[in-house]
Image (spheres, grey):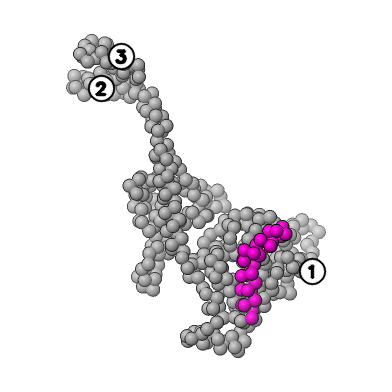
């Protein structure tokens, strides 16, 4: 055989090479070249040249080997949207297990605790959290190497984050096990907790995670509290749901809480969510427009409570509450919050709001509300929150000193 101008005798066992050549053409040339390079018979420059030639000859086989490997072992990937709860689940697991040690780019935040240490300890009030931010990092899960990737794209008006977790194997079972464990740990940390979401652009962000507040700690008029709680319990009864379904009536319930500021409208709403083991999604009406409202409602889960605060700002869109625009002004008539009355009504009546929905509207100014918003069918129960009476003030005083009973 000729290689680089030299005659190389075949070894005694070379009669096996033709069979290998059938499987890997050029194997004899490559194997003999390797043996000469490392035998020290060639000069330094010739060795370097041979390595380049060897690399060129080996390239097709390396790609073929890669294809065989990928055919046998595939890369499985799960993609995670940063504005969904799965993102918080995974980040919580990474924080808890301190698995971000190989990340070269991290985001430092003041984070919530992921353990049961004393939350009243001054040293542990505001712990630092380190989370993967940009690039790739690797971490171990049950002796399996997982790949965490995150990228950020500047869209001008916001930065879009993309997160994925990959694993190379014949089966995606490890990834599913990992997500399931993240889910279990996440639910454990949220036991006896109520998650409060607020809108941010087109997405929902966790505003706070608070201890579930018993209804007995919200000191209100007893008749008012019992009226709302009794109505909710009846609405959520399975028999009631079947009644709605049999008659093809949208299964939803609307409540209007009205009264002066500071009378407990929002506190009572959050307490109701905790009592029903639901999360609460709070719309800040002045900070959304029609498109935001539609997108936000479309992304809501099936079981939740929706709180629309200060609904009276939408009433400004009603004809009796606005000054007609100047003739040269072609701007659409909207409320001060940028969301139109018709959009809110369509959203409340839309298909996405007809299954297992509980709406709570709050206002400080009942007289400013358009009648279309609070008509029967959209608002089923109206509850007035008054300033504290003497019995309520006494109950609050007694509660603060202990011994209060609802």
In primary-sequence order, the first of circles 3 and 1 is 3
- Observer-nearest residue: 46 or 24? 24
Residue 10 is situated, as x and y percent measured from the top left of the image, at: 22, 12
Q: Which residue is pictured at 73% across the width and 65% down the height?
A: 377
- Observer-nearest residue: 357 or 2? 357
The answer to whether mark 3 and mark 2 are in CB contact below 8 A is no
Give me the C-alpha separation between circle 1 and circle 2: 91 Å
Q: Which residue is mark 2?
A: 34
The answer to whether mark 1 and mark 2 are in CB contact below 8 A is no
| Numbered disc 2: secondary structure | helix
- Residue 212 shows in the view: yes
Q: Is residue 158 left or right of residue 59?
A: right
- Label placed on residue 217: none
Residue 60 is situated, as x and y percent measured from the top left of the image, at: 38, 23
Q: Which residue is pictured at 63% across the width and 61% down the height?
A: 356
- Label placed on residue 320: 1
* Callout 3 crowding tier (Cα within 10 Å): few <14, some 14–19, many ≥20: few
- Label placed on residue 18: 3
Magenta residues (range): 223-250
The part of the image, by quadrant, that contains residue 286 is bottom right
**Which marked residue is nearer to the observer: mark 3 or mark 2?**
3
* Callout 1 crowding tier (Cα within 10 Å): few <14, some 14–19, many ≥20: few
């Amino acid at each position: 055989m000729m290689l680089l101008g030299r005659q190389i005798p075949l070894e005694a066992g070379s009669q096996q090479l033709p069979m290998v050549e059938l499987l890997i053409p050029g194997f004899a040339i490559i194997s003999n070249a390797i043996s000469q390079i490392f035998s020290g018979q060639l000069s330094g420059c010739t060795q370097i040249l041979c390595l380049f030639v060897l690399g060129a000859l080996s390239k097709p086989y390396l790609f073929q080997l890669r294809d065989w490997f990928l055919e046998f072992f595939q890369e499985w990937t799960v993609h995670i949207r940063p504005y969904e709860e799965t993102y918080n689940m995974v980040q919580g697991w990474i924080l808890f297990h301190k698995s971000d040690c190989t990340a070269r780019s991290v985001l430092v935040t003041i984070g919530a605790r992921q353990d049961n240490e004393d939350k009243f300890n001054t040293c542990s009030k505001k712990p630092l959290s380190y989370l993967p931010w940009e690039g790739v990092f690797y971490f171990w899960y049950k002796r399996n190497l997982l790949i965490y990737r995150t990228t950020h794209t500047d869209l001008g008006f916001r930065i879009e984050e993309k997160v994925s977790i990959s694993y190379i194997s014949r089966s995606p079972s490890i990834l599913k096990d990992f997500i399931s464990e993240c889910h279990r740990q996440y639910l454990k940390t949220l036991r006896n907790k109520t998650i409060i979401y607020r809108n941010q652009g087109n997405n929902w962000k966790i505003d706070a995670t608070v201890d579930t507040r018993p209804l007995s700690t919200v000191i209100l008029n007893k008749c008012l509290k019992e009226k709302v709680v009794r109505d909710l319990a009846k609405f959520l009864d399975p028999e009631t749901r079947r009644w709605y379904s049999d008659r093809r009536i949208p299964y939803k319930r609307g409540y209007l809480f009205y009264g002066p500021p500071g009378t407990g409208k929002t506190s009572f709403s959050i307490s109701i969510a905790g009592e029903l083991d639901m999360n609460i999604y709070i719309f800040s009406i002045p900070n959304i427009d029609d498109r935001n409202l539609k997108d936000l409602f479309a992304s809501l889960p099936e079981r939740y409570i929706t709180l629309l605060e200060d609904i009276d700002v939408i009433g400004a869109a009603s004809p009796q509450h606005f000054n007609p625009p100047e003739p040269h002004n072609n701007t659409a008539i909207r409320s001060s919050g940028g969301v139109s009355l018709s959009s809110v009504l369509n959203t409340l009546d839309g298909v996405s709001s007809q299954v297992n929905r509980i709406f709570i509207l709050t206002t400080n100014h009942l007289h400013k509300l358009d009648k279309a918003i609070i008509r029967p069918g959209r608002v089923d129960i109206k509850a007035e929150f008054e300033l504290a009476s003497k019995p309520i003030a006494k109950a609050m005083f007694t509660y603060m000193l202990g011994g209060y009973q609802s």
